[in-house]
Amino acid sequence: MNTISRVKGGLEFISVSQKQMAAALELTPARINQLIDEGIIIRDESSRVGEVMMLESLRNFYLSKKATGEGVNFWKERALHEKAKRELAELKVSERRGELYEAATVEAVLTELLIDFRNKLLGLGHRTAPRLAGLTVGEICAELDREIEELLNELAAESDEERIRFGTPSAGNIEDTAESERVELGGDVSATAE
């Protein structure tokens, strides 16, 4: 029977049994005794059966939970929710302005640049071999250094162009690059390698 034991005046003087308080707070009677010892749950000094002051004890209990971070703070949770919504809106605005790109787009652009660069590096030997025949080791190193520097400069220029454009790369560019390498060599790459 969960009834108020007695009211001696105003609402602030309502007292309940420790068992009733435990049921209301979904705690054990032993935990209520601990809270009484900690001064959070207040005993009704006029009670001969160990009742506690309901309103003051409830107020103290919930204030102590708020101070220790226990429980859910509605305003804190709402502020976190609003912050998350604002950040999501800012991301959408940045994307619409062209300041933010999806990871898949960035990956596709970088993949295209690296494949193009790889193809150019693979064609380097075939392209330079005829010019390097009969040169000394020092001249060969200097020529290869120049060719590699040129390829790196091309990569830097292409990445600058991609940063300006930064759209979805066309898959046709890869095949076009491989075909232009064959044309520069004056024939099929596999025929030159033999």
Image (cartoon, rainbow, N blue to C red):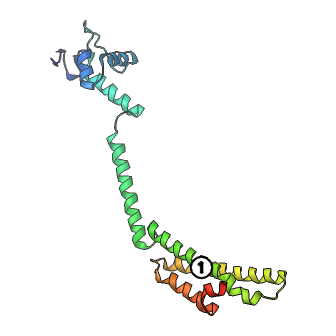
Pinpoint residue 58: horizontal percent, then vertical percent: 29, 25
Going 35% across and 16% down the picture, which residue do you hit?
36
Which residue extends farthest bottom? 186
Nearer to the camera, 81 or 75: 81
Above or below, 89 against 180 in this view is above
Residue 37 image-quadrant placement: top left
Quadrant where the N terminus sits is top left
Residue 115 image-quadrant placement: bottom right
Number of numbered discs present?
1
Above or below, 81 against 113 in this view is above
Going 35% across and 56% down the picture, which residue do you hit?
85
Which residue extends farthest top? 48
Q: Give amino acid for label 1.
A: Asn
Above or below, 48 against 194 in this view is above
| Residue 150 visible from this viewpoint | no
Going 66% across and 78% down the picture, which residue do you hit?
152
Quadrant where the C terminus sits is bottom right
Pinpoint residue 62: horizontal percent, then vertical percent: 33, 29
Nearer to the camera, 57 or 1: 1
Answer with left or right where residue 11 lies relative to residue 136. Answer: left
Pinpoint residue 113: horizontal percent, then vertical percent: 55, 76
Q: Residues within 10 Å of mark 1 (few under 14, many from 20)?
A: some
Answer with left or right where residue 57 lies relative to residue 150. Answer: left
Identify the residue position indicated by label 1 in the image. Answer: 119
Secondary structure, mark 1, is: helix
| Residue 155 visible from this viewpoint | yes
Residue 105 image-quadrant placement: bottom left
